[in-house]
Image (cartoon, rainbow, N blue to C red):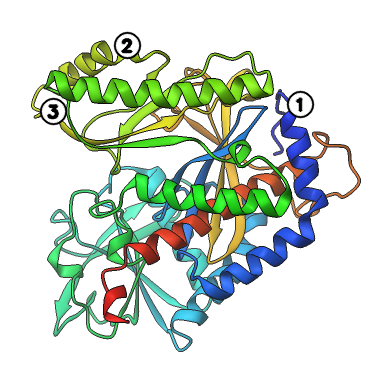
Amino acid sequence: MVPHLVTALTGPINELEQRLLDTMPAIERWFRLEWMEHTPPFYTSVDVRNAGFKLAPVDTDFYPNGWNNLTPEMLPLAVQAAMVAIEKICPEARNLLIIPEHNIRSTFYLSNLAQLRRIFHMAGLNVRIGSISPEIKKSTVIDLPGGESITLEPVLRNKGRIGVKDFDPCTILLNNDLEAGIPGILEDLHQQYLLPPLHASWAVRRKSTHFACYEEIAKRFGKLTGIDPWLINPLYESCGDVDLADAKGLAALSARVDSTLSKVRRKYKEYGIKEKPFVIVKADNSSGGMGLMTVRDAKQVPDLVARAQAAAPQDDGLRQLIVQEGVLTHERMNDAVAEPVVYMMDRYVVGGFYRIHADRGEDENLSAPGSLYVPLAFGASTQLPQLGVRPGASEPNRFYMYGVVGRLAMLAGSYELEATDPLADEGE
């Protein structure tokens, strides 16, 4: 099913699309050279927002868990990319162990595991799913909608290696962002490849590091293609530690909000954009216990913080926060707000989908209860860009643009993981 999008397909976004198509050979060569110097994250998903006047990534996930949203037509690409990714890491790999989240009650999440198992089985691996959840004490079969089932087995550790009963994998694939912390059972593994590495997890990772890397890449990409980097880059400011229970902390956060809004207003004025700018205040790690706050005026900060704290009264108020330029989404499907999510494995775009939400606005987070998922326009005959088609008229061309921005965010992820690698100083 190809979604019919009622979208703002005029103005700067069409000029950006045309520019990327015109410079496609230079773009692809640039990516090729980058991947000769840098290792892509094992698998990545990127939430992209199309405001009609800019297209920017707003979230990059190293543990994507919506693989069940990929259509059967997308699977051959995913399998080929999985083969490449495994071959680079462990060419003789035979056994792969997937370690999932603890969320065993969500059939949606479990269907994602079934899809991952299918992809890596077709890539030539024996695949088992090993849980580190204290709830899984024995082999547990769970039936899924559609007639499939998956088996969760308790992870066992022996002599510095982990596996499940009668299964010793050389490669461990984490599908768990370890937001609650890194469990000891995953540390100091002996001669096993853990993908992604532990420093990719939200126990360690910070959004500010990622967007600093992305900003650098956007500037270089802007020079390559002759575009203003702002058209693909959400401005942001890092707040560091902020005590939201203290007046000084609130004042510091308000100042950051005001500073970021001022920068966005200047860009809106430069491009003649009539929309009212806004920023998103969010935790620098994955969630930090506080939801996203949409702010259009720095004067709103104290009231919004008070409401957030009322919703989480056990909170001590200390936060690592970033303030990020809010990017509207003008994508629509049946009047519901939509945003594209691009899925990648190794350095390849393998598919994606639209996340849609009927009850959310164009300036709100769509990754929330009630969201639906519709595959991107990625049918077997329309994977490649259609050169010569006018901007805004071709869904494959629009998806190519999404894929370029997704790959830029993935490249930023590569830079980020290199910068935060605890073994880098040891020359390993």
Residue 317: assigned label: 3
- Residue 68 coordinates in the image, percent (x, y): 50, 50
Q: Residues within 10 Å of mark 1 (few under 14, many from 20)?
A: few
The image shows residue 369, relative to residue 199, as above or below, that is: above
Q: Quadrant of residue 257?
A: top left
Residue that numbered label 2 is attached to: 300
Q: Secondary structure at mark 3?
A: loop
- Image point 83% across, 35% down: which residue? 393
Q: Nearer the viewer, residue 302 or 144?
A: 302
User: In the displayed image of the protein, which residue is found farthest to the right?
Assistant: 388
Q: Amino acid at mark 2?
A: Gln
Q: Residue at x 73, y 39 (%)?
A: 16
Can residue 313 be seen here? The reply is: yes
Give left or right: position of 213 versus 383: left
Indicate whether 421 appears above or below 350. Answer: below
**What residue would you read off at disc 1?**
11
Q: Position of residue 88 (x, y in %)?
A: 50, 80
* Label 1 secondary element: loop
Q: Mark 3 and mark 2 in contact (Cβ < 8 Å)?
A: no
User: Rounded to the nearest whole Å, what is the CA distance between mark 1 and mark 3?
Assistant: 43 Å
Q: Earlier in the sequence, mark 2 or mark 3?
A: 2
Mark 3 packing: few (<14 Cα in 10 Å), some, or many (20+)? some
Kind of residue sitting beneath label 1: Gly
Give the residue displayed 75% in from the left and 54% down from the top: 383
Q: Secondary structure at mark 2?
A: helix
User: How far apart are the alpha carbons under marks 2 and 3?
Assistant: 17 Å
